[in-house]
Amino acid sequence: AQTVTQSQPEMSVQEAETVTLSCTYDTSESDYYLFWYKQPPSRQMILVIRQEAYKQQNATENRFSVNFQKAAKSFSLKISDSQLGDAAMYFCAYMKTSYDKVIFGPGTSLSVIP
Amino acid sequence: SQTIHQWPATLVQPVGSPLSLECTVEGTSNPNLYWYRQAAGRGLQLLFYSVGIGQISSEVPQNLSASRPQDRQFILSSKKLLLSDSGFYLCAWDPILNYGYTFGSGTRLTVV
């Protein structure tokens, strides 16, 4: 069965600095999709970034980028120029195929220090 | 436009009472729909998913049930709530193929 692990329950970063959140996953599939979701204090789940496993190029969305290492089954999220609004719970997630179930990691709580 | 609605936002219910949470999607047809539960300080656990009217798959045996009476409506129910049913319940759907889920705003359920 597929699993998603986030080994950092909590992290903190100074405003304007860069932080990297770690995620590893276990799968025997070759094609799949990975996601990072953000859950701010409002608890609304927001999709931050997605990565297709068959693409070697790392996805980037403004200040958010990923380091996708397929062989190592690692999918880390880098947040550059951290802002106070980045403070949230971040969930790494995996989806095997189209319209399959999304499996979430346990989450990393990120604090941003002014 | 495609939107997902979930209600109520907050609910406090006594142990043993029934539960009904509703989720509806607008602007699409035959969506895949999902119910997740998030316990305090923890990740998301998939409870049920549905690929069509009357089609429900259960991921975790528990005190809850789900139904899909209409194409764009997904309901989470319980006949008798337990204290352990407390949590944050999220409905989700996947509006674009392979682009992950869009979530509703969630329901905070407290069983007292």
Image: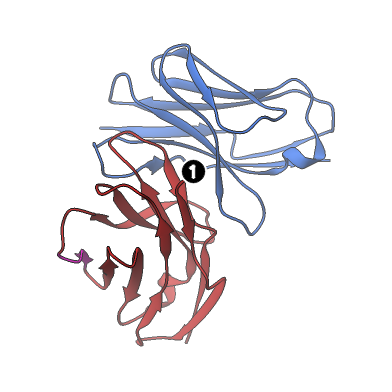
Residue depicted at 35% across the width and 63% down the height: A73
Q: Which residue sits at x=36%, y=35%? A: A100
Above/below status of A13 relative to A89: below
Assess whether residue B27 is covered by the magenta stretch. Answer: no
Of A5 and B44, the residue lying toward us: A5
Which chain hosts label 1? B
Visual colour scheme = by chain
Q: What residue span does the magenta drawing correspond to?
A: A57-61
Q: Is residue B62 above or below residue A113?
A: above
| Quadrant of residue B14 within the rendered picture | top right
Residue A105, how many percent across, how many down? 49, 57
Query: Which chain is drawn using blue?
Result: B
Chain letter, colour red: A
Residue to which mark 1 is pinned: B105
Q: Does residue A65 lie above or below A51 as drawn?
A: below
- Looking at the picture, how far across and down is residue A107, in whole percent? 52, 62
| Crowding near the residue tagged with mark 1, few <14, some 14–19, many ≥20 C-alpha atoms within 10 Å | many
